[in-house]
Image (cartoon, rainbow, N blue to C red):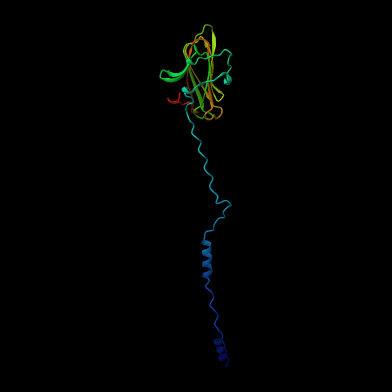
Amino acid sequence: MRAAFLTLLLAACPSQAAEPEPEAPMKELDARVAEPVDEPVEAGGPREAAPAEAAAAPEEVGPLVIHELWSMVDAEHDPFDRPQDAGCNRAGVMPELLADEAVYSVDTGFCGYITATQTTLLPIAKGQRIKARLWHFELSAPQPAMAHAEVTVDGLAVLDEQVPIPSPGGLLVRELVAPRAIPKGAPAFFHLHNHGANSWSLVAVAVLPRTSQTTDSVR
């Protein structure tokens, strides 16, 4: 009797619901983990990579002046020690060819004192060399004297020579290492004070590389 009662009781009770499949929440979790996580964006937009340092501008070499562009300086703007009796007949000053090379010539029989100026054609980097070449024929005068020749670039004396008279002809070549950068358009001056009737020719004022190597086009 007891066994039959238990059988009827179990048949009357509903069966328990099946437990949820354990893999389902794990699959959802795996999907969420696999999703990419966006990095926070700073205000003003995403951070950009720092730009590469700009390459330094290449150093230029070549002539700093053109002889046809020299202009004579009046007494008021002359930076050199100009004597009261200084005079210059422009007929004695001219650009010309000397042995197939362009020069700026001064015949001191007409022009015993001159200061001429123009602005430079190229920028000059610190450490580059500035070179000046000045030729004179044999120098003579009624009495022994001293000639003064000077070439400056932006206030720096590239060539500054006291030449005794009388003296044989010769070429003066001087270089200056630029102690600072000099921009294009800086003032250049050519100055000559000579006694007697002599002939001088400024051959070139040029900027060269930092090394001692030169080229035929930059002399």
Res 94 visible? yes
User: Which residue appears at 54% of the width and 9% of the height?
Assistant: 145
Quadrant in the rendering for residue 155:
top right
Residue projecting furthest to the bottom: 1
Image location (x, y in percent) of residue 50: 54, 45
Residue 143 placement (x, y as % from top left): 53, 6
Judge whether residue 200 can be spotted in this image. no
The quarter in which the N terminus is drawn is bottom right
Residue 207's place in the image compared with 143, above or below, is below
Residue drawn where x is 44% and y is 19% of the image: 96
Looking at the image, residue 106 lies above or below residue 144: below
The image shows residue 57, relative to residue 80, as above or below, that is below
Q: Nearer the viewer, residue 44 or 119?
A: 119
Q: Position of residue 180 (x, y in %)?
A: 56, 29
In this figure, what is the number of numbered marks?
A: 0
Residue lying at the far top of the rendered structure: 142
Q: Is residue 46 above or below residue 210?
A: below
Return the x and y of residue 217 as percentages of the image width and height: 43, 26
Q: State the residue in front, 12 or 161.
A: 161
Q: Closer to the camera, 100 or 93?
A: 93
Residue 104 or residue 51, whichever sits in front: 104
Location of the C terminus (image quadrant): top left
